[in-house]
């Protein structure tokens, strides 16, 4: 991987993290409310296999195997429905790039329909999933996926002026339904 590619990737991740933290500080929020650590950046795309191969090639890595996730829950405000997606991950220089293709109506599909393919969310491991969701909602975010039972969820921060969602994953990690290949 070229030095330029490393700088670009590092800069993009730092910009995203900085946007979250600076928004919190400018609005008088204590950044400690979203405790834990950054875990990944996620792209919403129309073709996960094509995009994963291109991202992997960019970093000189083999293309990852994609897999299908079923029964991912919406929160109660979305009628407790579930969604299906196809996902692959590329790990480059200690950063996980998650690539998601929606296969049913979902926040991922809504994002692509509204904004095109691109950065959908950044992921954070947090000590308390429910508290993190409440905090982000209190700052203008809209809870669009997940629930306490699966210990993770997305809060869309577009309504608060932040151009991506934040995925919060509670202590112990996500508790996903069984997956298919």
Image (tube, grey):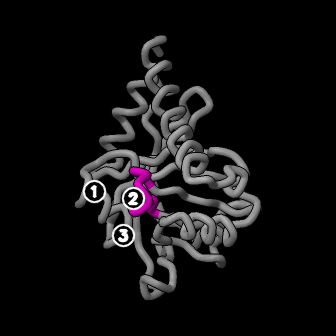
Residue 141: percent from left, percent from top: 48, 65
The local secondary structure at tag 3 comes to loop
What is the CA distance from the residue labelled 2 to the residue labelled 1?
14 Å
Q: Which residue of the protein is positioned furthest toward the top in this rendering?
A: 3
> In the picture, residue 4 is in which quadrant?
top left
Q: Position of residue 151 (x, y in %)?
A: 66, 70
Is 111 left, or right, of 176 in this rendering? left
Q: Is residue 124 left or right of residue 87?
A: right
Q: Secondary structure at mark 2?
A: helix
- Rendered image quadrant of residue 86: bottom left
Residue that appears at 40% across and 54% down: 161
The answer to whether the residue labelled 2 contacts the one labelled 3, judged by CB atoms less than 8 Å apart, is: no
Q: Determine whether, in the image, residue 34 is placed left or right of residue 70.
A: right
135 or 82, which lies in front?
A: 135
User: From which residue to which does the magenta span run?
Assistant: 156-164
Which residue carries the number 3 mark?
Answer: 106
Indicate which disc, 2 or 3, sits on the residue closer to the N terminus: 3
Structural crowding at the residue carrying mark 1, measured as other residues with C-alpha within 10 Å and reported as few (<14), some (14–19) or many (≥20): some
- Disc number at residue 158? 2
**Disc 1: which residue:** 112
Q: Residue at x 50, y 85 (%)?
A: 76
């Amino acid at each position: 991987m070229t030095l330029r590619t490393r700088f670009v990737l590092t800069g993009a991740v730092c910009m995203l993290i900085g946007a979250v933290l600076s928004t919190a500080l400018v609005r008088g929020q204590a950044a400690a409310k979203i405790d834990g650590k950054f875990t990944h950046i996620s792209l919403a795309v129309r073709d996960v296999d094509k995009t994963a191969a291109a991202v992997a090639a960019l970093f000189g890595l083999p293309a990852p195997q994609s897999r299908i996730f079923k029964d991912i829950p919406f929160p109660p405000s979305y009628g407790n429905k579930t969604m299906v997606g196809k996902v692959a991950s590329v790990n480059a220089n200690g950063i996980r790039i998650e690539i998601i293709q929606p296969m049913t109506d979902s926040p991922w599909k809504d994002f692509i329909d509204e904004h095109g393919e691109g950065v959908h969310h950044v992921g954070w491991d947090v000590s308390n999933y429910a508290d993190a969701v409440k905090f982000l909602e209190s700052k203008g975010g809209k809870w669009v996926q997940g629930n306490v039972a699966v210990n993770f969820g997305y809060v869309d921060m577009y309504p608060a002026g932040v151009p991506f969602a934040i995925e919060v994953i509670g202590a112990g990690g996500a508790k996903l339904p069984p997956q298919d290949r």
